[in-house]
Image: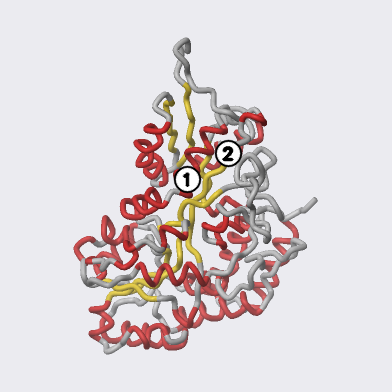
C-alpha cells in the first residue's frame, strides 16, 4: 500500500468515532462474483472493519451498467469486473486507473521490459488484451480460458477413431466426423461455425489484432479468415455439424445425450459438463488439444478500479488478493473451474491431479500447456462489432452458399462503414 496516501488513495478505515463502517463496493456478474465471495474471509481478516457489498447482474446488463457508470460518473463501484469480450472497449475508458502506474504496480523494481514484477506473474496474453496502449494496464486478469477439444471417447472408439486421428489435422477431424455420422448418426460438432471461430483466433503473431491491424484497418480479407471460412464450409458440406448454437436447449440436450460427440471451448467447459450439462456421462468424456496444433483462448475475466472509486486503496488490496494470491487463485479454480491467470497457481500440484469426470485424465496439464502457447494479441474497442459482422457473413456462406471471397469483402466494407475512427 506504499504510496497510496501520497495520492489521496489511502483507505479511510473507521475509527472509534466513526458513525458508519467503510463500504467497499464490487460490481460483478455470475459466476465470477462467487470468486469474490470466496475471498471475503481472507480479505476481512485483513480488513475487519470493512463491509464488502457485491452487486451481480447478468453479463450484458452488468457491462451496460458499467459503461453508463464510467460515462456519467454515477453509481461507480470501487472494483469493476470486465469480461474479456468487453475488455477491448472498456479498457480504453478514461475513467479507469492505470494499474501499471504508481501507486499500484508501478513501483521501484519494475522490469526492464516495461512490465512490473506483478505483471510478470500473470498470463501474458491476458495482460496484453487489457493494455489499450503501451504503459497502460487498465485491468488485471483473474481467470483465463485456454481452448480445448472435449470429446466422447466411447463414441469415437465405437467407430475406430483415435485421439491422434481426431486432432492430427482439420482434414482428419472432418473425416472422423463423417465416419461418426455414417456409423452412429451422431454429429461430431454442434455447429460448423466452431471451426471458423478457432481459425480466426489462432495462428496470430504476438501483438497482432484479431480483426484489426495497428492502424485500425480490418483484417478480414487475410488468408487467416479465408481458411477459417473454408474449413467451416467443408464441415457443413461433410454433414458433421448439427447446426446447433452453443448454450441453446438443443445444444445442451445434444451434449447430454451423446448426439454431439465433441465440443471445442475453453477449459472451463469441463466444469459445466460435470456439474449440469452431462453429469451422467462421467468417465466418457476426454480432453485434447485443438486439432492441427491450434491454440486459442475462450473467455477470461478481469477486474479494474475506476478513477471515481471511493475506496481505491481497498479495491487494490482486494484485487491483489483475487489476481496475485496463489492460494486464492487455486481455490477459485477448484471451486469454479476458472483457470488461473496467475502463473504461480498454474504451477501448483493441483494441475497434476487426475479428473474423474474425464476418465482420470490429468487434463489440466493440457490446459496449462495451451495457456502458455496462446499469443498475446491486441484488443480493439470495435472487436465486438467485427465479431458480429463476420459471423453474419459466415452464416451466409454456410446457409446460403455465398462465396468466401465475396463474404469477406462484404465484411470489410460493412466494417469500414460502421466503424468510424477518430
Q: Is residue 321 above or below residue 128?
A: above
x%, y% of residue 355?
Answer: 26, 66
**Crowding at mark 2 (Cα within 10 Å: few <14, some 14-19, many 20+):** many
373 lies above or below 157: above
Q: Up-down: is 235 above or below 46?
A: below
Q: Secondary structure at mark 1?
A: helix
Image spot of residue 410 (x, y percent): 69, 69
Tag nearer the camera, 1 or 2 = 2
Q: Give residue 391's position: percent from left, percent from top.
A: 56, 65
Left or right for 24, reference 136: left
Q: Which mark is residue 59?
A: 1
- Kindly identify the residue that appears in the image at 47 percent across and 19 percent down: 14
Mark 2 lies on a secondary structure that is loop
Which numbered tag is attached to residue 305?
A: 2
Q: Quadrant of residue 270?
A: bottom left
What residue is rendered at 57% in x and 71% in y? 200
Amino acid at each position: 500500500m506504499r504510496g497510496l496516501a501520497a495520492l489521496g488513495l489511502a483507505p479511510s478505515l473507521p475509527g472509534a468515532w466513526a458513525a458508519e463502517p467503510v463500504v467497499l463496493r464490487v460490481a460483478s456478474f455470475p459466476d465470477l462474483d462467487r470468486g469474490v465471495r470466496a475471498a471475503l474471509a481472507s480479505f476481512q481478516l485483513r480488513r475487519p472493519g470493512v463491509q464488502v457489498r457485491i452487486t451481480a447482474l447478468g453479463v450484458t446488463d452488468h457491462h451496460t451498467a458499467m459503461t453508463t457508470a464510467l460515462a456519467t460518473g454515477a453509481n461507480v463501484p470501487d472494483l469493476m469486473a470486465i469480461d474479456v469480450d468487453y475488455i477491448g472497449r472498456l479498457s480504453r475508458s478514461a475513467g479507469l486507473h492505470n494499474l501499471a502506474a504508481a501507486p499500484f504496480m508501478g513501483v521501484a523494481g519494475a522490469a526492464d521490459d516495461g512490465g512490473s514484477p506483478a505483471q510478470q506473474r500473470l498470463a501474458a496474453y491476458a495482460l496484453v488484451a487489457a493494455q489499450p496502449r503501451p504503459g497502460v494496464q487498465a485491468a488485471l486478469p483473474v481467470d483465463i480460458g485456454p481452448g480445448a477439444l472435449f470429446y466422447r471417447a466411447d463414441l469415437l472408439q465405437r467407430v475406430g477413431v483415435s485421439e491422434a486421428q481426431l486432432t492430427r489435422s482439420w482434414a482428419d477431424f472432418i473425416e472422423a466426423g463423417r465416419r461418426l455420422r455414417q456409423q452412429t448418426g451422431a454429429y461430431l460438432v454442434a455447429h460448423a461455425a466452431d471451426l471458423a471461430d478457432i481459425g480466426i483466433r489462432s495462428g496470430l503473431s504476438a501483438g497482432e489484432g484479431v480483426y484489426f491491424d495497428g492502424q485500425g484497418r480490418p483484417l478480414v480479407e487475410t488468408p487467416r479468415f479465408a481458411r477459417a471460412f473454408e474449413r467451416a464450409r467443408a464441415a457443413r458440406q461433410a454433414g458433421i455439424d448439427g447446426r446447433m448454437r452453443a448454450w441453446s436447449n438443443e445444444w445442451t440436450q445434444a451434449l447430454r445425450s451423446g448426439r454431439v460427440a465433441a465440443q471445442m471451448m475453453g477449459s472451463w467447459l469441463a466444469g459445466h459438463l460435470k456439474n449440469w450439462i452431462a453429469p451422467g456421462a462421467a468417465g466418457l468424456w476426454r480432453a485434447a488439444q485443438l486439432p492441427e496444433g491450434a491454440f486459442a483462448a475462450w473467455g477470461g475475466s478481469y477486474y479494474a478500479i475506476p478513477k471515481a472509486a471511493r475506496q481505491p486503496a481497498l479495491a487494490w488490496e482486494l484485487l491483489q488478493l483475487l489476481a496475485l494470491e496463489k492460494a486464492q487463485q487455486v481455490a477459485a479454480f477448484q471451486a469454479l473451474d476458472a483457470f488461473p491467470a496467475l502463473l504461480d497457481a498454474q504451477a501448483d500440484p493441483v494441475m497434476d491431479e487426475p479428473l474423474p469426470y474425464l476418465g482420470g485424465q490429468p487434463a489440466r496439464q493440457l490446459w496449462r500447456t495451451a495457456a502458455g502457447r496462446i499469443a498475446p494479441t491486441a484488443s480493439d474497442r470495435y472487436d465486438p462489432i467485427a465479431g458480429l459482422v463476420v459471423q453474419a457473413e459466415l452464416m451466409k456462406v454456410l446457409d446460403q452458399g455465398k462465396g468466401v471471397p465475396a463474404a469477406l469483402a462484404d465484411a470489410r466494407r460493412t466494417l469500414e462503414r460502421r466503424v468510424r475512427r477518430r
